[in-house]
Image (cartoon, rainbow, N blue to C red):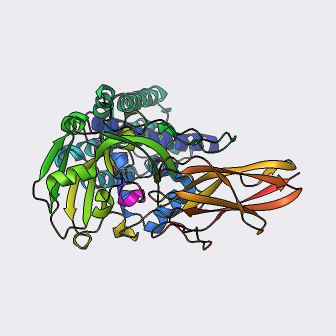
């Protein structure tokens, strides 16, 4: 009898899981049918991102890097699954409590959808998928619990606890329950597969049709010698699919180029409204620029170098006419993210741009299609707004941007940094000459020197790869005469202003990490 009761509870837990899955799948498909409407599960994730303590966000980026969003989604699914399974088991004897638990999850999803800053749809449309999830999950759970009711009655009878009206001799109606499970499974499959096929349809289709004109001012070929022939060193140019991604969008906004526009307003003489087609008709420039995330730990991989094509921000601001007294530009993404950038960094001659292409193709959707900002020399959270839709010329005293509200500095020039790529930490290498190599960066200042030392010994100057301007990282290599034993290698860089990295180790918050990167190596 114990196995009979256990199998009944397992079936009930499965019923709860299927009901939740049906609600999520149906809602995801419904959301995918509307441009700019996130699925409820995404809205819940966005709410977690916005409400989470800053320290928790820092921990997530530090531990998981570009996979932080996948981890968050997995955690949300796990919580829903546990609650749904518990509701199913409770529903065997207390169906109203089970329905209440399911309804609570649904209401939370509706609230998250109604307050989701990333939604581009109208308020009524935004909450429709969440309402559908609420109705489908409650209806499905009620149906599946009703199919299980006869098994509960049979179990009660077997234990001598018949309920009034029970058909004591009845057995579990397997056929009815199986039909309910199959029907629910069909809803899950259709909703899940349909959501995958449909969204984000508008942006995907738009990107496929987008042709980026040739730049009037190209970056030219990568200089000979900019890439060193060292096995394991970071590639000089980062492929789009390998480029790090750290942002506040759980899923990329679905923004087609045909409906995109950029508004430039605020402390300007002439407010501008520029369509994507108009943007492409302007003078395009092509530049290689290394971007770095402020959350990058010493030796971290949240940096990448790409060829960007776009329109210089300075040209647009000159056309708009910046009024005296303005010292900042507040950029806003289509998902509601904001960043504050000093006007000086946009107008001092550096190649700050509204980028429309990355490594020779339209921006990948996850990297900001149709358009994003790229500003050499500043950490991304104060400059590299993706899915850009709005530039407001203003003053730092007039606003507080997304991350400055959460304890990060309002202004954040990139700090000089260097990293050892090979050998990796805890690697074992053979006695003799060993290539120690990596990359160093100090965007908009450039790298003039990289040094390596072994076991706190004398600093030895490494050989630098050919420079490709001041806005990109430089590879470096040092040939080490390695002797047997366990050794510690450290690296430091000096920028073109003559400033050498400090040895003082600090965390990324509030304006970027400092310290020397080191690795421990065993020589045999």
Q: Is residue 466 left or right of residue 462?
A: left
Q: Residue at x 23, y 46 (%)?
A: 120
Q: Residue at x 49, y 40 (%)?
A: 14
Q: Quadrant of residue 343?
A: bottom left
Q: Is residue 450 left or right of residue 275?
A: right
Q: Is residue 290 visible?
A: yes
Give the number of marks.
Answer: 0
Q: Residue at x 20, y 44 (%)?
A: 121
Quadrant of the image for the N terminus? top right
**Between 154 and 165, the one nearer to me in the picture:** 154
**Between 515 and 242, the one nearer to me in the picture:** 515
State the image coordinates of residue 67 (x, y, percent, origin top left): 51, 48
Compared to residue 14, the image places residue 451 above or below, namely below
State the image coordinates of residue 380 (x, y, percent, origin top left): 41, 56
Q: Is residue 214 left or right of residue 277?
A: right
Q: Is residue 186 left or right of residue 228?
A: left
Compared to residue 173, the image places residue 499 above or below, namely below
Report the magenta residues as a range. Answer: 378-386
**Residue 341 on the magenta span:** no
Majority secondary structure of magenta residues:
loop
Compared to residue 135, the image places residue 458 above or below, namely below
Q: Quadrant of residue 383?
A: bottom left
State the image coordinates of residue 416 (x, y, percent, origin top left): 53, 63
Q: Is residue 34 visible?
A: no
**Between 303 and 108, the one nearer to me in the picture:** 303
**Between 494 and 514, the one nearer to me in the picture:** 494
State the image coordinates of residue 125 (x, y, percent, origin top left): 19, 43
Q: Quadrant of residue 336?
A: bottom left
């Amino acid at each position: 009898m114990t196995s009979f009761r256990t199998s009944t509870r397992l079936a009930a837990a499965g019923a709860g899981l299927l009901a939740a899955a049906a609600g999520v799948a149906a809602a995801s498909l419904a959301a995918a049918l509307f441009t700019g409407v996130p699925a409820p599960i995404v809205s819940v994730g966005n709410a977690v991102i916005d409400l989470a303590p800053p320290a928790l966000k820092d921990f997530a980026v530090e531990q998981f890097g570009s996979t932080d969003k996948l981890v968050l989604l997995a955690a949300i699914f796990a919580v829903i699954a546990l609650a749904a399974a518990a509701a199913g088991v409770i529903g065997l004897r207390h169906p109203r409590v089970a329905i209440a638990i399911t309804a609570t999850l649904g209401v939370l999803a509706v609230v998250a959808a109604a307050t989701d800053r990333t939604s581009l749809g109208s308020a009524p449309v935004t909450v429709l998928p969440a309402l559908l999830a609420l109705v489908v999950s409650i209806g499905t759970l009620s149906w599946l619990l009703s199919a299980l009711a006869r098994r509960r009655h049979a179990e009660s009878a077997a234990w001598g606890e018949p309920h009034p009206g029970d058909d004591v001799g009845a057995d579990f109606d397997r056929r009815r329950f199986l039909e309910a499970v199959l029907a629910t499974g069909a809803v899950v499959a259709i909703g899940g597969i349909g959501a995958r096929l449909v969204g984000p349809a508008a942006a995907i289709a738009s990107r496929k049709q987008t042709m980026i004109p040739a730049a009037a001012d190209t970056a030219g070929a990568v200089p000979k010698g900019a890439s060193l022939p060292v096995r394991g060193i970071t590639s000089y140019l980062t492929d789009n699919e390998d480029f790090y991604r750290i942002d506040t969008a759980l899923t990329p906004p679905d923004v087609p180029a045909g409906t995109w526009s950029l508004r430039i307003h605020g402390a300007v003489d002439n407010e501008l409204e520029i369509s994507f087609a108009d943007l492409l008709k302007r003078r395009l420039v092509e530049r290689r620029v290394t971007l770095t995330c402020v959350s990058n730990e010493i030796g971290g991989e949240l940096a990448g170098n790409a060829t960007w094509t776009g329109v210089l921000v300075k040209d647009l601001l000159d056309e708009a006419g910046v009024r005296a007294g303005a010292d900042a530009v507040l950029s806003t993404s289509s998902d509601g993210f904001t960043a504050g950038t000093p006007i000086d960094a946009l107008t001092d001659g550096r190649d700050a741009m509204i980028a429309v292409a990355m490594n020779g193709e339209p921006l990948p959707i996850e990297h900001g299609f149709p358009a994003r900002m790229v500003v050499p020399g500043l950490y991304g959270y104060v400059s590299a707004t993706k899915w850009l839709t709005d530039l407001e010329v203003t003053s730092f005293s007039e606003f507080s941007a997304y991350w400055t509200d959460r304890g990060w500095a309002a202004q954040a020039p990139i700090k000089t940094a260097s990293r050892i790529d090979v050998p990796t930490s805890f690697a074992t290498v053979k006695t003799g000459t060993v290539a120690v190599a990596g990359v160093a960066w100090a965007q908009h200042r450039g790298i003039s020197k990289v040094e390596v030392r072994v076991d706190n010994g004398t600093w030895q100057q490494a050989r630098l790869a050919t420079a490709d301007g001041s806005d990109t990282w430089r590879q470096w290599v040092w040939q080490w005469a390695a002797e047997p034993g366990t050794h510690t290698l450290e690296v430091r860089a000096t920028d073109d202003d003559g400033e050498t990295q400090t040895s003082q180790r600090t965390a990324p918050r509030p304006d970027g990490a400092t310290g020397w990167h080191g690795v421990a190596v065993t020589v045999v």
